[in-house]
Amino acid sequence: MSKRINVTLPDAVAENLEKWADHEGRPTANLAAYLIEKAVESAIEQGKFPTPTPQNKTD
């Protein structure tokens, strides 16, 4: 299951994200989700927060 969140970005960051997504031919939200996922994975690997939720969690 996926969760939806809202993120507010500075104008310049949002514009650059849109340009990046356009360059890759993907939706901006898709690129943002990918980047957030990679950042969370990196934080977990670096031990920046305890007890991460398993990725394949079933409810």
Image (cartoon, rainbow, N blue to C red):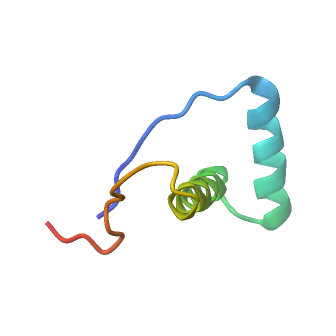
Q: Quadrant of residue 9?
A: top right
Q: In the visual, does 46 lie left or right of 28?
A: left
Front-most of residues 47 and 6: 47
Side (left or right) of 10 relative to 29: right
Residue 25 drawn at (x, y percent) = 77, 66
Question: In the shown orientation, is residue 6 left or right of residue 20?
Answer: left
The quadrant in which residue 39 appears is bottom right
Task: Report the quarter where the N terminus lies.
Answer: bottom left
Quarter of the image that includes the C terminus: bottom left
> Residue 13 at x, y = what percent?
78, 34
Residue at left 76%, top 56%?
A: 21
Q: Residue at x 84, y 48 (%)?
A: 19
Question: As displayed, is residue 12 above or below residue 2?
Answer: above
Residue extending furthest top? Answer: 10
Rendered view: 48 above or below 7? below
Residue shown at the point (76%, 45%) measured from the top left: 17
Which residue sits furthest left? Answer: 59
Residue at x 86% of width, y 60% of height: 23
